[in-house]
Amino acid sequence: MDIRKNIAFFQNQLTTNVCRLVAVSKTHPVEKIKEAYDAGQRIFGENKVQELCAKQPLLPNDIEWHLIGHLQTNKVKQIAPFVSLIHSVDSFKLLEEINKQGKKLNRVIPCLLQVYIANEETKFGLDEEELLALIQSGKIAALDSVKVAGLMGMGTFTDNKEQVRMEFRGLKKLFDKINEMKLPSSVEMKELSMGMSQDYEMAIEEGSTLVRIGTAIFGSR
Ligand SMILES: *Cc1c(COP(=O)(O)O)cnc(C)c1O
């Protein structure tokens, strides 16, 4: 894989859109990440806390690290000092813990709520009802060291492109619906994280603001 070329390709694809690239570097060594960095990429995504914490100190300080994988409450503490965005918040309990750790560090930690949009049993996330209940609850308004900055979703792993398109479209609709509601100050719907190597073009067409691309940049894992 020519990482430099791939980064240039995606940066080019994305210049005309409001969408930004999260380079998903999970399983790839820091040397590869450095290649992407040298090609101008600054946002990187990892899906495991342990791997993220091992790589972060070895790489430049101006990298924006995003956690994109499932997060356990007992691991929030490790990433709280430096993480730029957590894409995968799927419970109030987790949001509360992120708030607690953010408060200790005197920082507001940006988060996305992960929404379950796929037609699969294995994916994490809130369903629409849970999401709306969470956003409208007074509980979320009381959190002042987290910022809910939008939504994240993963499409079904399938060759059926139309199905995935409909899932993305549904998430965008939900995003717009929430944006029309009166929101607590801890919630601001700006980012819509959807789209991976297989389906990013569709995701952009359907309104993504953050695509999470691994394989198409770094090669297969
Ligand atoms: C691994 C991963 C990606 C990137 O997937 P590719 O198919 O390699 O582009 C995106 N999002 C999440 C949550 C991931 O775990």
Image (cartoon, rainbow, N blue to C red):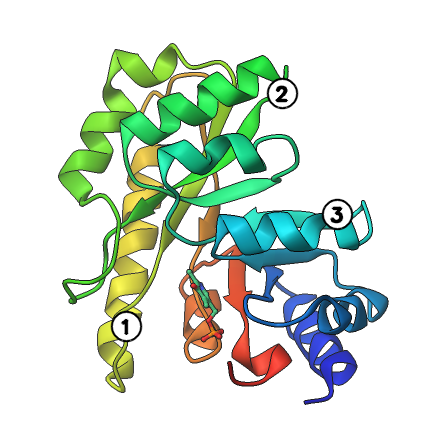
Q: Which residue is mark 1?
A: 164
The CA span between labels 2 and 1 is 36 Å
Q: Which residue is mark 3?
A: 57
**Spot occupied by residue 47 in the image (x, y as percentages of width and height):** 47, 57
Vertical comparison of 212 with 64: above or below = below
The answer to whether 3 appears left or right of 171 in the picture is: right
Numbered circles on residues, count: 3
Question: SS for tag 1?
Answer: helix
Type of residue at label 1?
Answer: Val
Quadrant, the N terminus: bottom right
**Spot occupied by residue 9 in the image (x, y as percentages of width and height):** 70, 80
Vertical comparison of 46 with 87: above or below = below
Type of residue at label 3?
Answer: Pro
The CA span between labels 3 and 1 is 37 Å
The CA span between labels 2 and 3 is 19 Å
**In the rendered structure, which disc, 2 or 1, sits on the residue that comes first in sequence?**
2
**Spot occupied by residue 205 in the image (x, y as percentages of width and height):** 45, 68
**Dot 2: few (<14), some (14–19), or many (≥20) neighbours within 10 Å?**
some
The answer to whether 78 appears left or right of 54 in the picture is: left
Type of residue at label 2?
Answer: Arg
**Which mark is nearer the camera, 3 or 1?**
3
**In the rendered structure, which disc, 2 or 3, sits on the residue that comes first in sequence?**
3
Task: Identify which residue is drawn at 43% across, 80% down.
Answer: 198
Question: SS for tag 2?
Answer: loop
Q: Is the shortest distance between ligand 1 and the CB of mark 3 under 8 Å?
A: no
Q: Which residue is mark 2?
A: 107
Q: Mark on residue 56?
A: none
**In the rendered structure, which disc, 3 or 1, sits on the residue that comes first in sequence?**
3
Q: Quadrant of ligand 1?
A: bottom left
